[in-house]
Image (tube, coloured by chain):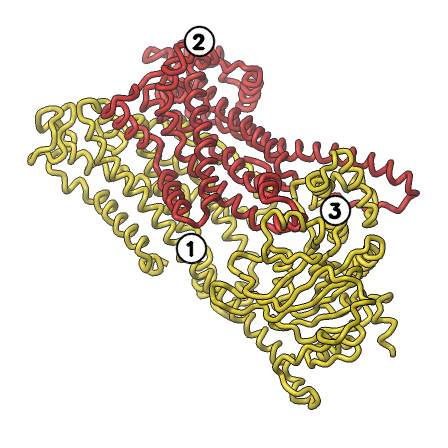
Amino acid sequence: MIKNVWRLSSGRIAIAALSVILFLAVFGSLLSPHDPDDTVGPQLTGPSSQFLLGTDYIGRDVLSRVLAGAGLSVLGALLVAAIALLFGALPGVLSVYLGRVFEWVTLRVIDTLIALPFLVFAVAMTALLGNGVFQALFAVGFLLAPVFYRVSRSATLSVANSQFVEAAILSGASTWWVVRKHVWNKVAPPIAISLSTTIGLGLVVIASLTFLGIGVSPPRATWGGLLATDLEYIALQPWAPIVPIVLILIAVLACNLFADAVRDTAGESGRQLLNALAAKKADKKAARHERSNSPAPASSDSANSTPAPVVGASEPRHPADQPEAVLDVRDLQIVNSVDKAELVEDMGFSLRRGQTLGIVGESGSGKTLTICAVLGILPKSLTETSGTVEILGRDTADFRKQDWLDIRGNSISAVFQDPGSYLNPSIWLGRQVSEVLRVKKKLSRREAKAETLRLFEAVHLREPHLIYEQYVHELSGGMLQRVLIAAAIALGPDILIADEATTALDVTVQSEILDLLQELQETQGLSLVLISHDLAVIAQLSDEVLVMRAGTVIEHGPARQVLHNPQHEYTQLLITEHERFGLDRFLNSDLGETSLV
Amino acid sequence: MTATLTPAAPAAGRAKKDSRASAVALRMRRLLAAIGRILTALIPVFLLGSLFTYMLGAISGLTPAYLQLGEGATPASIKALDQQWGLNRPFFVQYFSWLGHVLTGNFGNSWVNNFPVSQLLASRAIVSVSAAGVALLLGVVFGFGIGALAVRFQSTWVDRVITVFTSTISVLPPFIVGIVLIDVFAVWLRWLPSSGFMPLSAGFGSWFSHIILPAIALSFDTIADVARQLRVGLATAKRQNYVTGAVVRGLSGRRVFFVHVLRNGISPAVAILGLKFPNLLGGAVVTEAIFQLSGYGQFASQSAIKGDVPAVQAVLVISVLLVVIFNLLVNVILARLIPSSAYRGL
């Protein structure tokens, strides 16, 4: 750990400064040019060759007193930290093992100790218990113990609950090896961080107490005591406090710098772990990739693995019997402006009024990015480099902020996976729906509430009055998705995008939400864009299906054609996999009726 | 508090009525749960804090005889004095009788001069309340101001300068800041008085000039922590999905920030105020000594040195009570800001 800290330049500075301070503490009194407690010169003189830092009000050498004071000030801080560690860590570790009562009592005691105004109690404890150095160290150490209680408790909990320790012991590793290899690495950094900040804090507190003349009687030199006399004669010697202050600050800053360096390097090993995990994930992904590519040589009729020509998109249509397009996306390209990676290429579709477009593809295939581009909420690091998005015939390329505000909610809206996270946890659910109505439709509070209650009924939420006043954490996922849908359709938009809106809900709830979307489409004339990695969801509602993979469209056409006569091997794979895992999850789905053909 | 209600579908009319009634019941339940949660967190702190305070006096072994009788004390006279002060009763009897008196505002009499401690403290309270109050105000104003600036200019040089500034001032101990402030503003620049206190009745300017330096010395820690919590809190809240949700519903950036981001984003900064308040009270001991303010911090350390146990106990239990009351306030604010969180305690 120290080795890691030494690698950081801030860590080297901290270690160097701490070594100097520690050296002064241990050998300071040996270096004193004069006796620190004796009058050796005239009173209150400035710095001279004989008295490098001058003399104090009774003619004692200030430098000698600073050096003599280092011992108690610094070693005191170390002792305080050690006492705090003892008082805190012991009950902290035991709280995990000694049962509920002990745990509850110690937790309450720790809560209380943290809440106490620290310095007042330190002063009172020291003075009432006998006003000596030992009492001061004991009082401060005791009051600083909560930090170590918490650290050691959480470290013990994490080790006690971790299966790897158990597994290592079961697999025959020696207990000592397990402790060294696993437990120590986990426990040492947080304890080192707390120790180092506590030493810094202890130094300040000891200095504060000695400044007040508590714990140490006057003739004995301490940094706090020196500052107290400096303050008395500050009008005569305004420069006098500088040296003790600088020494205290160096010590405190070095302690905190050291703690930060430990934190950073401990974070580093955490990052290494994350990287290792990411690498594993990438391997898995690659394996899946291979698996999905493997049928390619077997199926001889599909020619190559490069994206096949888009099927269906260029099919001639008869504009006369088709309703108008409400959403038109052409040749959309999205690029990461940092590493120039092309995330979405040649994406295009057109959604007609009252119709449903299903977009299917695995995660990372660019479905959601396309939707972000359509809604104008792409992250700043991504840019739309080419292509057009037209919503109700308006090109969004030259949209200003106000245009987006006009169109979002009013013309186009969206619902997402994990609906609870898309609703503010601190505001009544009903208020979040009526907020939209009040702000955008300029309804009064009362009208907005009435309209919200109507919307809740429209999405089949029972007890609308109750739900109006409930918070996110009080409802289930399916109910939250209904609330989110109610908020999305509040202004009567033309287009509703449902991005994985039923993912992670259980199957019956999924089917209920899909039924609701279908019903709303019929009653409100919504045009839907349904996005899912799940073919069954797409199959139930879609008129047209678009299959995406690695940022490109690989197949696009009427639902029946794509689902029953897929041209691209990837689509075929999606469908065969689906058949294997139970195709007809939704009994009333269109696919269910027709797939027997 | 989690109430996922799955009612059997009743007739439509009745359902409406029921749902209104259950909304009222829900509000009541929430209110009671919030009160219960806050009280179960705060009452143990007060009880344990006061018990600790009283025990401190008991284990110190100090008695009024030690202060009042001096060298000529005989065992009989010590016993008589102990009986007079009720110190011969069992510990818990003494504790609960003391606690009962404390809760009715009677803090006992000083062992040194037999004056009621509450009288001795009353005149000093205004000094400490002035310093801690102004420090709290500075902490809130500058903490929120600096934190908001850091968020506004996130990941620019402004943000980095503020980060370095806050992490530096957070480790500067108040008594060192105090000495430097006196050196600079009183001795060198001669702008402000170095010590003493003037009541507000002597004029705002005079009061303020005496209180501002101690308040600044006390406030650094609070400023730094509030600013850091605000920065992290707002930056985290801005990234939440509900912000995207509100944007997609067509709400303006300004509205999204003030209604949806701010509310959740400031709660960590509010919570940290509750945690920092004990430090403001505790710091008074040192800052009052530096600036020679005769507030309750000075009273505490002088009484402690003299061994005047009832006076020390009074200061300690009042400071615990103040911490508990302030945290009650913070908890109530937090319960209104973020009702969903199970935040409780100190």
Please report whichever mark, 3 or 1, sits nearer to the chain's N-terminal start.
Answer: 1
* Chain for disc number 1: A
Q: Nearer the viewer, mark 3 or mark 1?
A: 3
Q: Disc 3: which chain? A: A
Chain letter, colour red in render: B
- Mark 2 lies on residue: B115
Position of residue A516 in the picture relative to residue A406 (left or right): right
- SS at badge 3: loop
Asked whether the viewer can see residue A109, the reply is no
* Residue at 35 percent of width and 34 percent of height: B173
Chain A colour?
A: yellow
Q: Nearer the viewer, residue A120 or B140?
A: B140
- Judge depth for marks 3 and 2 and give the one in front: 3
Q: Which mark is residue A491?
A: 3
Pointer 3 and pointer 1 on the same chain: yes
Residue A58 sits above or below residue A340 on the image? above
Estimate the x, y position of residue A361 in percent, counting from the top left.
Answer: 67, 70
Instruction: Residue A317: name its quadrant.
Output: bottom right
Q: Residues within 10 Å of mark 2 (few under 14, many from 20)?
A: few
The amino acid on which the numbered mark 2 sits, given as a three-letter code, is Phe
Amino acid carrying mark 1 in the image: Ala
Label 2–label 1 contact, CB within 8 A: no
- The reply to whether discs 3 and 1 touch (Cβ–Cβ < 8 Å) is no
- Label 2 resides on the chain identified as B
Element class at badge 2: loop
Q: Tag on residue A188? A: 1
The residue positioned farthest toward the front in the image shown: A320
Q: Relative to residue B33, is residue B294 drawn left or right?
A: left
